[in-house]
Amino acid sequence: MQAKGKLLSIEKIRSKEPEIKGDLISMKYQVDGEEVQLAYSYDFPVSMDRQDLRLLSLIPLVNYSLFTEEIEADFPITKQDYDFIKKMMVINSREIYVNKLLKRKEFFREEYIPKTPSDEEASYSPRINIDLEQNTRSPYVNDGKGSVAIMSSGGKDSLLTYGIMKEVGANVYPIFVNESGGHWKTARVAYDYFQANHENTLRIWTTVDRFYRKMDSKIKALNDKALTMWSDTYPIRLFIFPVYIFSSLPYFLKYGISGVMKGDEFDDPRSFVPEYGINHYYGIYDQTQSFDLALNSYFESIGYGLKFYSALRSITGLVEENILFNRYPELARLQRSCHSCHEENGQIIPCGRCTKCDGILLFLTANSIDPRIINYKEQDIADFQKTYHERLFRLDRDELDHSKFLISKGEYGKFNEHVEKIHEDSEFSNLQLIDERWRDKIVGILKEYTKGFTHLENGEWT
């Protein structure tokens, strides 16, 4: 397979035995003979099962599945861990192949872009040359009270999830993962507020962004732009949430967590069509119901009573903003979704120009919400209102068209009633996966801001 051979950039990654010292987890890797390090720091000294710790060291490597020939380790792993990693690597390779190599060609050198794409090439995964051992983890039983952890970032999904889960009576633990780079500015507004006002707020500091930059520099298919130029999307990595989730295990187990929520709004499954016969998830696999089910299956297989679900997977971002700003205005003011926020006079300001900002400005304007509430500048708002109908958005087509229709009162876009409904679909947005303790109350809140239910039939939401 000549094309696949071209993509291979790393001959061997060897994971060393990870270490815990107090509140710090340290990991080291030999990447073709060069040492690369990764660290996680917690709010207090932590303990972690040795098998969980070893798996955590392998999770970030999934991002490089398409470009790596072999993965080794100085330690054994369980068959459950092996099967999970292998499955994730195949899926991730397809995600990168389709949604990065074939769709975001500006990040790649021309000679590495596949000329005759194939499912066989896309489904490549490295050899995992690691010994296996029996699963010896002690079974984890949650507190039985429906306590939930919310993977928090300061974006609309996690803020709205927090507001809803607090309202329905859940014991909520917001967990913020503080990457060492500039992205922390995006989450800092929410984190500072939660830390001051909500005693269950937790944080993990990590150097994973430095790890990614070092690893990206070894991928020969990436061009200079991908390695040096600012962009509002990552050049290759798509397996991001799993790093946050598995690094949060010490918190999950310490506080008796039963449910883990990432937010995860509605994404129209009609977008998940094969490209060149290659199945994929439009680059958002780790935000899908399929991924939640894979996590549920994995954790059940190792004896951990953890379930993953979303309160928001049946509603669009347009509806989310409506609920957040009208029902939880104090939380809404914390929203920062822009990855290029900057500080002015002690305030965190979104850039107002990136695709993230375009999406937020679209939803707020369509809901007649003033973007100045979350520090958008008047000039950026005015520019958006003049040019929104010409801008490029990374949104589902129906949601984009419906939002434009609402803003322009019918001059632009197209009316799509389902965008303001609750989407029920067993495969992609199954409300039955929500913890039954909270399900009816959550759906009751959603019903107040939507126009009924819709179901996918013959490729149409009806």
Image (cartoon, grey):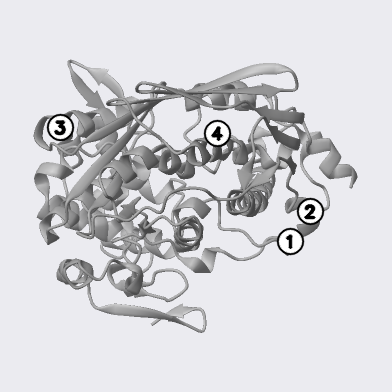
Query: Residue at label 3?
Result: 193
**Residue 377 visible, this angle:** no
Query: Can you tell which mark lies on residue 276?
Result: 1
Please, what is the three-letter code of the amino acid marked with disc 3? Tyr
Query: Residue at label 2?
Result: 117
Mark 2 burial class by Cα count in 10 Å: few <14, some 14-19, many 20+: some
From the viewer's side, name the closer residue of 104 and 303: 303
Q: Where is residue 155 in the image (x, y as percent from the top left)?
A: 29, 42
Instruction: Give me the C-alpha separation between circle 2 and circle 1.
Output: 6 Å
Q: Determine whether the residue tagged by mark 4 lies in a helix, strand or loop.
A: helix
From the viewer's side, name the closer residue of 230 and 282: 282
> With respect to residue 274, does 166 lie above or below?
above
The image quadrant where one finds the C terminus is bottom left
| Foreground: disc 3 or disc 1 | 3
**Residue 84 visible, this angle:** yes
| Foreground: disc 2 or disc 4 | 4
- Residue at image x 34%, y 64%? 402
Q: Position of residue 421 (x, y in %)?
A: 29, 72
Instruction: Give me the C-alpha separation between circle 3 and circle 2.
Output: 48 Å
Please, what is the three-letter code of the amino acid marked with disc 2? Pro
